[in-house]
């Protein structure tokens, strides 16, 4: 191959050019000659002789071998020995495209972080409302990915209204008491108490109404489509809101319980990319997971190491500020002063090192360290870092499998270079539930009403 052109030689090349450029009449004459040869070599009864049959076998084998050689030559012109396509003229363009996409991805990421930081500086309630917006957009993306790619072109009766109704009902069940709690000083006290008392009863009646209307909407010939969509809606509500519906509680128990786990996931995602780019498949040659072929063991484990460190020190930094550690019980705008009795989990303490370790550090490393000062919350943050590294990525693998099931690359193109809301928040959903259970089980910080 020279200059990107493959020059075929010998009989294979002649045959290839002849077959490609010959006329129909020429091919017909050749076929007729072959038929005459076959007749002359056959027996008197019109059956081919043993010699002719053997010759046919040899001819077929020879033709197959020739075709195989042609295929091999054609393939070898596009693929080198290591089975990778060579596009020398496009290599510079591919590198340029990669860095352009990376720059766009970084720019969008910085914009998202800036917007999120601005919301953090307003009020806990606005952070909670941001969670509702994220969940609503993710719900829409997952619902539509099946509806638009399932092959059922016939739309369900009341498709949009039914999904919107059950989404709003789920929001009302999970979040209405929390919002009412934040606004209780601005609501009539009698009405506030009545609402909290009858909230679950109201939710149940609304669910019964929606269920009855759904059953009445069933149409003959559309049963399968309607029940499949009903099951898909229920699954989406469970995955998107059922897992992360407790984020309100985490936020109002103290922003630190929401911010540290959330940032741990973002940091883990960044370090997985960096470690994979630098060391991917250079240490561990085995594939990581078929659902996510671009992931590597080096990126997965390297990100875990850095995420745990980040979680520990970031938690120690935030634990200094009452805005992040104090529960929020009433709505107000702006950071201002947020005062509370500091929970012991945020009070600095220390650990006295054993004398053997002190002597080892002094004699070997010339370090005079006798104690380690830390905030107990930093130990909780280590667990959040581990969970963010080894468990929450499976939320991403889950959505990757979902996209592969419907043959889509991203759920949406809402964020250029990142995909849709679900592509960005798939790991956050499981983390919210983890933190909620952790708070209720291992700390006394929980102040949010059950």
Image (cartoon, rainbow, N blue to C red):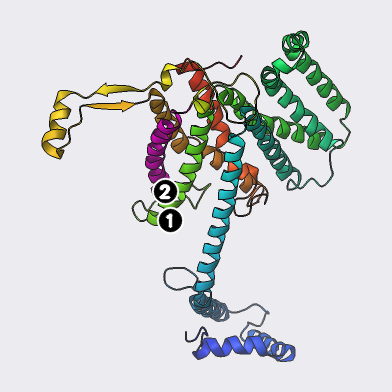
Q: Nearer the viewer, residue 128 or 412?
A: 128
Q: Which residue is under mark 1?
A: 277
Q: Residue 14: x, y in percent?
A: 56, 90
Secondary structure under the numbered disc 1 in the rendered image: helix
Label 2 environment density (alpha carbons within 10 Å; few <14, some 14–19, many ≥20): many
Q: Residue at x 55, y 63 (%)?
A: 100
Q: Residue at x 42, y 72 (%)?
A: 81
Give the image quarter of residue 220: top right
Q: Residue 274: x, y in percent?
A: 43, 52
Q: Is residue 364 visible?
A: yes
Which span of residues is magenta-colored? Answer: 297-321
Secondary structure under the numbered disc 2 in the rendered image: helix
Q: Is residue 86 above or below residue 251?
A: below
Q: Residue at x 61, y 31 (%)?
A: 334
Q: Which residue is under mark 2?
A: 299
Tag 1–tag 2 contact (CB < 8 Å): yes
């Amino acid at each position: 191959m020279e200059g990107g052109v493959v020059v075929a030689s010998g009989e294979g090349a002649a045959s290839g050019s002849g077959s490609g450029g010959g006329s129909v009449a020429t091919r017909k004459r050749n076929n007729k000659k072959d038929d005459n040869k076959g007749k002359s070599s056959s027996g008197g009864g019109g059956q081919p002789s043993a010699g002719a049959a053997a010759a046919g076998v040899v001819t077929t084998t020879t033709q197959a071998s020739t075709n195989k050689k042609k295929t091999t030559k054609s393939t070898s012109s596009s693929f080198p020995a290591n089975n990778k396509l060579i596009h020398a003229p496009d290599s510079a363009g591919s590198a340029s495209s990669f860095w352009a996409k990376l720059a766009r991805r970084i720019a969008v990421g910085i914009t998202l972080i800036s917007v999120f930081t601005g919301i953090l500086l307003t009020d806990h309630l606005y952070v909670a409302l941001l969670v509702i917006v994220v969940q609503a957009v993710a719900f829409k993306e997952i619902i539509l990915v099946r509806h638009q790619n399932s092959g059922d072109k016939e739309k369900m009766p009341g498709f949009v209204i039914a999904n919107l109704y059950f989404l709003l009902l789920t929001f009302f069940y999970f979040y209405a008491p929390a919002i009412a709690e934040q606004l209780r000083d601005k609501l009539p006290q009698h009405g506030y108490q009545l609402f909290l008392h009858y909230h679950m009863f109201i939710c149940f009646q609304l669910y019964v109404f929606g269920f009855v209307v759904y059953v009445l909407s069933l149409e003959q010939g559309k049963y399968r489509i309607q029940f499949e969509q009903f099951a898909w809606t229920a699954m989406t509500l469970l995955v998107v809101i059922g897992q992360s519906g407790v984020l309100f509680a985490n936020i109002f128990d103290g922003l630190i319980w929401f911010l540290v786990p959330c940032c741990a996931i973002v940091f883990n995602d960044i370090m997985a990319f960096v470690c994979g780019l630098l060391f991917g498949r250079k240490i561990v040659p085995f594939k990581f997971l078929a659902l996510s072929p671009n992931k590597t063991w080096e990126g997965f484990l390297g990100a875990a190491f850095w995420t745990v460190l980040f979680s520990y020190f970031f938690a120690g930094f935030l634990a200094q500020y009452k805005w992040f550690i104090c529960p929020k019980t009433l709505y107000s705008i702006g950071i201002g002063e947020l005062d509370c009795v500091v929970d012991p989990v945020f009070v600095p303490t220390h650990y006295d090192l054993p004398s053997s370790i002190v002597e080892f550090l002094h004699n070997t490393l010339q370090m005079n360290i006798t104690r380690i000062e830390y905030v107990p919350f930093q130990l909780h943050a280590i667990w959040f870092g581990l969970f963010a590294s080894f468990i929450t990525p499976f939320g991403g693998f889950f959505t990757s499998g979902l996209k592969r099931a419907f043959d889509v690359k991203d759920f949406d193109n809402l964020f250029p270079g990142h995909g849709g809301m679900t592509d960005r928040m798939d790991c956050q959903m499981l983390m919210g539930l983890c933190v909620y259970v952790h708070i209720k089980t291992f700390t006394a910080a929980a102040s949010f009403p059950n």
